[in-house]
Each structure stands twice: as structure tokens, then as C-alpha cells.
Amino acid sequence: DVQLVESGGGLGQPGGSLRLSCAVSGFTVRSNYMSWVRQAPGKRLEWVSSIHDDGRTHSADSVQGRFTISRDDSKNSLYLQMNSLRPDDTGVYYCVRQASGFDYWGQGALVTVSS
Amino acid sequence: DIQMTQSPSTLSASLGDRFTITCRASQSVSTWLAWFQQKPGKAPKLLIFKASNLQSGVPSRFSGSGSGTEFTLTISSLQPDDFATYYCLQYNFYPYTFGQGTKLEIK
């Protein structure tokens, strides 16, 4: 069975850092495009970052230079390093496999940025 | 960035009704368009990929069509489980962009 399990969410300070992890089972992360998608409370879904099978990455302008997507092939896991956090980064962050559309999603990790 | 505009934003409908959502892109995305269903507190669920391909396990009452800048999602006969919020997503060009969502409510 395919499973994506996010962890590392919680309360972050403005200007601070958090690191989200996504442990994957049922397929190989390094062979797929993977993404992070977030959703602020009551708002639409927002694409954040993607990493291709060849390691190329893309990020939304709103997080460029602050967030970094990466993967650890030995752990079959995806990560999102979030620095210089802002209150508008608050939301649920989903780890997603980007195959045939975005076909498998994690349950989401809540990130709250507040002092 | 490509803007995705869904209509309507909210719709009230009855069981058995036919339901159609439109998603318009500000420039052509070919057929790189997906549709998702989301229920409160849950992750989105992929319904349709590449504009018209039904994701495995999704009931056949769901269908998608379109190409270029105009796309539709149709539910042929609404069932109780279908009342949710629906989103389109273009994944032709970065940054990928979602529509604002269409909330389907029971009349």
C-alpha cells in the first residue's frame, strides 16, 4: 500500500525555521516527481515546491529563497526546510506524489507561524 | 503566472442532479489539468488527470473534458458522498496553480 506520512509541523516563530518530513512507503521517491502543497485556513490549495526525479527543483515565488525541498533516497523520504517563516506561511502542508496528476497525498502537517 | 478561474464558486444541488464546474486558464495549458475533491479536514483526492482521464477507483459518474483554456468537470448524478469542494489544477507550467474552489452544497 502507498503511504505518505508528514511530520515536523507545529508552532514556529516569525523569522524562525521548521523542517517538514514526509516518509514514503509503497513507491520510490527518487523515481518520481514529488511536491509540497499547502492550504491556509479557509483558502485555496497552493503549490509550494517540486523536486524532479533528476533532482531539479522548482518553488513558488512566495517561498523562493526561504524554503528548500529535498529528498533522502536512503530513507525514501521528502523534506521541506522552511526558514524565515512568516505568519502567512501558516497552513496545512501536504506531501504529494506528482504522477498522473497529483495522485497520492499525505494526511497533512499543520504549521502555525505566530509569536 | 497562469490564473485558474473556476465557476461557480458555490452551488446548491439535489441528489440525482447533474453538476458541471468550469475551469478557465489565463493561457493554454494543453491538457495538463487535474480535478480534485476535498472534504473538510481531509487531503484532496484526485478525480481526473490530464483533463479527461478518470483516476483509478473514482466512480464513472465523474468525467472531465476540455483542452487549452477551458475545462469542465461533470458529475452525472449527484450522490450523498459528492458534496464537497472541488479544485482544478494546471500542471503544465511552473508555478502550478489551483482554481479558487467550487463548494457543492445540498439543496
Image (cartoon, coloured by chain):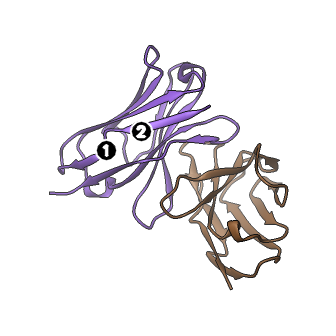
Chain colours: A purple, B brown
Q: Is residue B22 above or below residue A15?
A: below
Q: Residue at x 65, y 50 (%)?
A: B90
Q: Is residue A93 above or below residue A55?
A: below
Q: Is residue A105 left or right of residue B78?
A: left
Q: Are marks 2 and 1 in contact (CB under 8 Å)?
A: yes
Furthest residue in direction left, as rendered? A115
Q: Callout 2: helix, strand or loop?
A: strand
Q: CA distance from mark 2 to mark 1?
A: 8 Å
Quarter occupied by residue B107: bottom right
Q: Residue at x 44, y 47 (%)?
A: A108
Q: Is residue B38 left or right of residue B28?
A: left
**Residue B18 x %, y %:** 83, 74
Write down the residue under mark 2.
Answer: A6
Amino acid type, residue under disc 1 in the picture: Gly
Q: Residue at x 43, y 18 (%)?
A: A75
**Residue A67 x %, y %:** 34, 38
Q: Is residue B55 above or below residue B83?
A: above
Furthest residue in direction bottom, as rendered? B107
Please identify the quadrant where the C terminus of chain A is shown.
bottom left
Write down the residue under mark 1.
Answer: A9
For disc 1, the chain is A
